[in-house]
Image: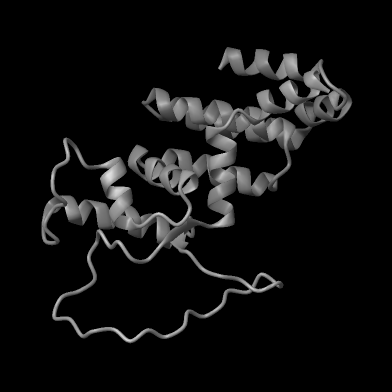
């Protein structure tokens, strides 16, 4: 984590927000976040997750898209979710409105193989990943909202009765990240601090 400390130190000495960022880095609230992140860092075993922790704590020093309590939730998410959960989130973040079928094709399919049978272990595992993210309020079916941010009901559609359940690899219903899910991806997968610093240099 030494490079995290160095990066924060460099960023705190540059730009118009130097005083605010320095105050943030020295605050008890931020130092508590750092301690929680270091603890979780020691408990994970993959380079990918450690990179997420690094970006999270650096970005949490410089941007205020969400509260520190939400950042704590993000720390738990990194530790809790499998890399495939993160890949699914990222796929939806990059392609809003993508379907479950296309997510499978882009993330899980290998060598143009056919989609698994609905009663296969692969389908069971995929449903488990999707269920975890839906239950956690990270992803949902894409919905329209009014000017007050209220979700609008979908118009009823006449469906042809079928003897089988909807496929785990459905190509009809579009998926989106929740706002919290979008903030998570923004914090842990994007170099927001570097983007801010670059923008300041170009002004």
Taking depth in this image into account, of 167 and 12 the one nearest to the observer is 167
The relative height of residue 130 versus residue 144 in the rendered view (above or below) is: above
What's the residue at 58%, 53% (across, down)? 180
Taking depth in this image into account, of 119 and 79 the one nearest to the observer is 119
What's the residue at 65%, 48% (across, down)? 69
Q: Position of residue 29 (x, y in %)?
A: 73, 38
Q: Position of residue 100 (x, y in %)?
A: 32, 56
Screen quadrant of the N terminus: top right
Residue 7 visible in rendering: yes
Say which quarter of the image contains residue 17. top right
What's the residue at 34%, 56% (across, down)? 130
Q: Is residue 56 left or right of residue 112?
A: right
Say which quarter of the image contains residue 198. top right
The way the protein has been coloured in the rendering is: one colour
Q: Is residue 95 left or right of residue 32?
A: left
Residue 81 visible in rendering: no
């Amino acid at each position: 984590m030494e490079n995290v400390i160095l990066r924060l130190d460099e960023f705190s000495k540059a730009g118009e927000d130097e005083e605010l960022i320095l105050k943030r880095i020295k605050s008890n609230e931020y130092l508590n976040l750092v301690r929680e992140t270091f603890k979780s860092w020691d408990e994970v075993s993959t380079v990918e997750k450690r990179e997420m922790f690094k970006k999270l704590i650096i970005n949490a020093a410089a941007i205020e898209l969400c509260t520190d309590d939400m950042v704590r939730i993000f720390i738990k998410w990194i530790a809790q979710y499998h890399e495939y959960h993160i890949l699914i989130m990222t796929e939806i973040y990059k392609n809003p409105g993508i379907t479950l079928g296309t997510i499978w094709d882009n993330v899980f399919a290998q060598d143009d193989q056919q989609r698994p049978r609905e009663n296969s272990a692969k389908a069971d595992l995929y449903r488990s990943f999707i269920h975890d993210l839906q239950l956690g309020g990270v992803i949902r079916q894409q919905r329209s909202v009014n000017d007050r941010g209220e979700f609008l009901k979908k118009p009823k559609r006449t469906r042809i009765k079928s003897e089988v359940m909807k496929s785990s690899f459905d190509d009809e219903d579009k998926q989106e990240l929740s706002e919290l899910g979008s903030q998570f991806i923004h914090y842990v997968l994007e170099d927001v601090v570097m983007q801010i610093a670059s923008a300041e240099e170009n002004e």
